[in-house]
Image: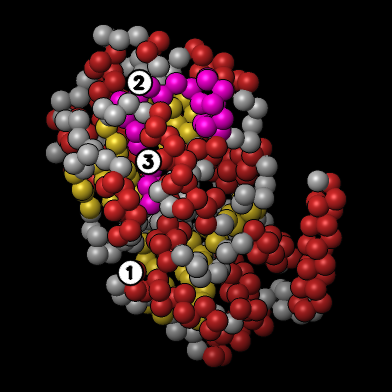
Amino acid sequence: MKFEDYHFSDEVKMSIGKLGFKKPTDIQFKTIPHILRGEDILAIAQTGTGKTAAFAIPIIEKLHAKKKFQSRKDGIKALVMVPTRELAIQIDDVFKKLAQNTRVKSFCVVGGIDQGPQIQKLEEGIDVLIATPGRMFDLVSQGYIVLSRIDFLVLDEADHMLDLGFIKDIRDLLKFLPAKRQTLFFSATIDAEIKKLAYSLVTNPIRIQISPKDPVSKNIDHALIKVEQDDKRFFLERIIKNYPEARFIVFTRTKVRAERVVQAMERVSIKCLSIHSGKTQEERNEIMSQFNKSLINVLVATDISARGIDFPDVDFVVNYDIPEQPENYVHRVGRTGRGIKRGKAYSFCSPQEDPLLLQIEELLGKKITLVDIGYSDYSEVVKESEDAHTDWKTLMKQMDEAEKSYAQRKRKKK
Ligand code: ADP
Ligand code: MG
């Protein structure tokens, strides 16, 4: 079935066409009719399969159809909650594009920037609000956001939104919402416990799950490289230099390790930037913009900072560190192979990380293919590095000291 054949308004069809979408993806095909019928949904589908449009299209269509009968003064009609600011901005962009020929107005509120202009925009009246919990609750408690007319509540990256960090926020939020509403959960991963929690928050949900057996998209070839912890930088350098035109996202476990990777790559003349919660919102926006415009082709990220983000044309994901939460493996490699594109993911696994790898393979229900690097090749990668002659131990010590003094300065400032 094509989008042309749907009973959508011409305005919505036109903007779907403008985005270049001809046929719905599996998850869109399966969820859109239920959402149009007013049902609650728990939708699980692999990364990069178009979950955003799966909820944005029917929400816009329904609001657009009703628009003639109600005024915007009624308040916000749809609330989309997401874990990060970058994801909120991205989803708002999709709503804006899909709603461009309608009167449906979307807007996003995120923390880290001045709230003045956000308040002004809210007072003009909007239909769809995309928000991260922190700033939204501030604005609710100050009375700038009224949630009593919500028809749709969407939790994107739902397993993360219902996880420990956010569940209290979500429960508080439900108190502000009308009982009669549609609740939609979307995610690529969900475990049994979170699923139970999700069900407890909705009435008669329709559960839609696409390829539950293998949570990694079939567009991604993923492989494992066994490498000693201290040699990882050489392997990263080799892969990046083998593909000078390619675009990479490199994942590390912590912010500090992300910074170390950036420094190690800079020493071998590889330009890269890092994104994580230790940077200001302005810095994060600037980095996203540089990476999205291909001004830099290597982005070093931590798990949370990249969840759900649709970075354009990422060829490689490198798990520089094996993730501690197994489901994060799925979210990380899912930054490539999006839509109809293919992608590659390499995971660098040191002997110390083998137990984490086992957990991931258990979640995937299969082994990750091992790339066999014979010993001579291995030592060649290390030897050929521009950086092989640096005294790494001294350097690490210097960096540790720099970090400590930075932390001290920061504490003093406070
Ligand atoms: P997910 O949330 O499932 O990870 P996104 O909603 O971010 O995926 O979409 C992934 C990519 O697929 C985006 O670049 C989006 O523009 C594209 N896409 C979505 N729906 C379609 C479609 N029906 N046809 C072609 N491309 C699509
Ligand atoms: Mg998504």
Q: Residue at x 56, y 33 (%)?
A: 135
Left or right, 295 with respect to 386, comes to left
Query: Disc 1 to disc 2, how far (Cα)?
Result: 41 Å
Q: Residue at x 30, y 10 (%)?
A: 70
Q: Quadrant of residue 237?
A: bottom right
Q: Is residue 138 left or right of residue 411?
A: left
Callout 1 secondary element? helix
Colour style of the rendered protein structure: secondary structure
Question: What residue sits right under mark 2 in the picture?
Answer: 149
Mark toward the viewer: 3 or 2 = 2
Mark found first going from the N terminus, 1 or 3: 3
Q: Is residue 316 left or right of residue 58?
A: right
Amino acid type, label 2: Arg
- Distance between the Cα atoms at labels 1 and 3? 24 Å
Q: Is residue 282 left or right of residue 407?
A: left
Residue that carries the numbered disc 1 in the rendered image: 364
Q: Residue 222: percent from the left, percent from the top?
A: 39, 68
State which tag comes first along the sequence, 1 or 2. Answer: 2
Which one is nearer the viewer's eye here, 78 or 250? Answer: 78
Quadrant showing the N terminus: top left
Q: Quadrant of residue 204?
A: top left
Q: Is residue 325 magenta?
A: no
On residue 155, which mark appears? 3
Q: What segment carries the magenta color?
A: 135-159
